[in-house]
Amino acid sequence: MTARGTAVVTGAAQGIGRAIVERLQADGYAVLGLDVHGLDSLAAETGCRTAAIDVSDPAQTATVASLAPDCTVLVNNAAIQRYQDLLHTTPDEMRSILDVNIQGPVLMAQALVPVIAANGGGSVVNLSSITSVAHAAGTSLYPASKAAMNQITQAMAVEFGAMGVRCNAVGPGTVLTEGTQSHYGDDAARAAIAGTLPLGRMGAPGDIADAVSFLCSDDASWITGQTLFVDGGYTAAHGQFFRWARKAPK
């Protein structure tokens, strides 16, 4: 147990989740990393405690409180993304997206918010996405699930505030991770994407971890119910993207 308590991070094994683990450890938290795969590598490379938990399973999430009795931070990062158009998304795929991306964060909050409150209060940070406000074709129900995440974050903020628990969301933009490498194409394609962003580069997992760290910190002590888009200017530049698309070669 550390002076700051334990931060529980879901979807912790790689990409943004692992960056969050490393940043919160640097901030002084003990970290419990949850995932359904990759935990041996996570434990070996970061030294954090780990547990194999499927966040969509109520029986499994109910055990987490006993694993982190000193929890003061919950980061709901675990998510399923399907690159599939709606007409061909199967009922099983729909259910898996909704179970992990919507039900999962709520189950984790049910398990850990009472613990956080009993430990004097703390923070929940949910991972949203720019697709919650800037939809891309062929992404199935993922954008809808992240739009729901924004609303769930506000509901959590209203319901948990009196318990001393702040709840915010971080919405990543075009972040290059192990899971998104194939989606963003080769170096030329990635350079083209970066060129459309006001800040001129794609994001890195550490950019998102920095925002999560801030929202968990005392510097954000009067911030709750907000979704912070960390996107290099993507959501601010819709008009620029439309102009770029009109000029792009056919």
Image (cartoon, helix red, strand yellow):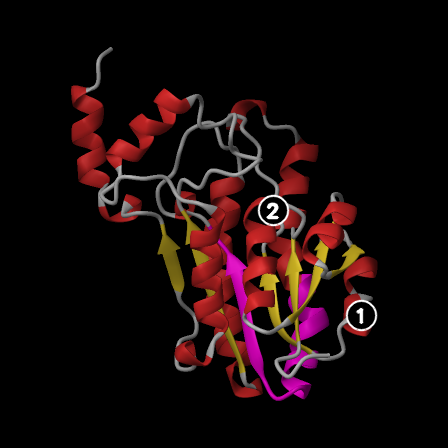
The residue shown at (57%, 33%) is 82
Earlier sequence position, callout 1 versus callout 2:
1
Instruction: Give SS at disc 1.
Output: helix
| Mark 2 surroundings: few (<14), some (14-19) or many (≥20) residues within 10 A | many
Q: Identify whether 192 is placed above or below 239.
A: above
Q: Nearer the viewer, residue 97 or 32?
A: 32
Above or below residue 72? Residue 168 is above
Residue 48: horizontal and vertical position, in percent? 72, 61
Q: Residue at x 79, y 47 (%)?
A: 40
Q: Is residue 23 magenta?
A: no
User: Residue drawn at (22%, 25%), measured in percent from left and top?
Assistant: 245
Residue type of the residue flagged with mark 2: Ala
Q: Position of residue 223 (x, y in %)?
A: 40, 76
Residue topped by disc 1: 67
Asked where in the image residue 201 lies, by quadrant, the reply is top left
Q: Please tell me the numbered disc located at residue 41.
A: none
In the drawing, does residue 131 fall left or right of residue 15? left
Numbered range of the magenta stretch: 107-128
Provide the residue designation for mark 2: 79
Relative horizontal placement of residue 148, taking residue 3 as reference (left or right): left
